[in-house]
Amino acid sequence: DADVTQTPRNRITKTGKRIMLECSQTKGHDRMYWYRQDPGLGLQLIYYSFDVKDINKGEISDGYSVSRQAQAKFSLSLESAIPNQTALYFCATSDLHNEEQFFGPGTRLTVL
Amino acid sequence: EDQVTQSPEALRLQEGESSSLNCSYTVSGLRGLFWYRQDPGKGPEFLFTLYSAGEEKEKERLKATLTKKESFLHITAPKPEDSATYLCAVQTVNDYKLSFGAGTTVTVRA
């Protein structure tokens, strides 16, 4: 079983709809991250969380919100989706002692 | 502002033709430089972390090196299965976030 899972894997939605992307991990890591990836651009950090009570904005947090429901779960919400939020979204985790991040398989989101 | 630039954007190689990818960076203080491999439709997979100038790490046909301004990922005698996008990222001493470059897409033809 995958250590970092994301649901859904693909989603098509319409402008103005609220959508939630979910991430779960079995690695026991405290730190979790949400990134988006656009063609020709690097991964851009949306939000990150170092523990359940700690939530921080990344480079591109406008239009997004997150919830850390438990150590193992970190959700990303788009309150009112717009077409330029069409992208690949990745969740990642890391632990306190190792800086490497482990990524989930991604969610491909299309906003029409 | 931290900047990470990867070159070239794309690299097409013949099987066995060795080459290098470049990652140049401008940061206020480097904690570590990371290399990842990403296959189409998948999440990035960790390869290496380098912490100080002069450090080198190897894994199969891949070797990563670090200077004070850039890192190289050398691919020796590549095989078609080495085809992927290679991403580098930097982490600064000020925080634990990663700043990624746009990646180099490597295609190895048999």
Image (cartoon, rainbow, N blue to C red):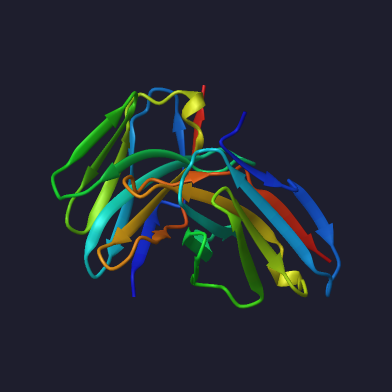
Near-viewer residue (B74 or A31): A31
Q: Residue at x 42, y 58 (%)?
A: B101
Image quadrant in which you'd find residue A46: bottom right
Image quadrant in which you'd find residue B1: bottom left
Mark yes or no: residue B10 visible: no
Q: How many marks?
A: 0
Q: Is residue A4 left or right of residue A101?
A: right
Q: Residue B52: percent from the left, percent from the top?
A: 16, 50
Q: Residue at x 33, y 36 (%)?
A: B19
Q: Residue at x 65, y 71 (%)?
A: A64
Which residue sits furthest left? Answer: B54
Q: Is residue B12 above or below residue A44?
A: above
Q: Is residue B78 above or below residue A17?
A: above
Q: Is residue B51 left or right of residue A81?
A: left
Near-viewer residue (A84 or A2): A2
Q: Residue B15: percent from the left, percent from the top?
A: 44, 24
Q: Residue at x 47, y 57 (%)?
A: B102
Near-viewer residue (A82 or B70): A82
Mark yes or no: residue B47 visible: yes
Q: Residue A106: percent from the left, percent from the top?
A: 64, 47
Which residue sits furthest bottom? Answer: A62
Q: Residue A57: percent from the left, percent from the top?
A: 50, 72
Q: Is residue B53 left or right of residue A25?
A: left
Q: Is residue A87 above or below residue B66?
A: below
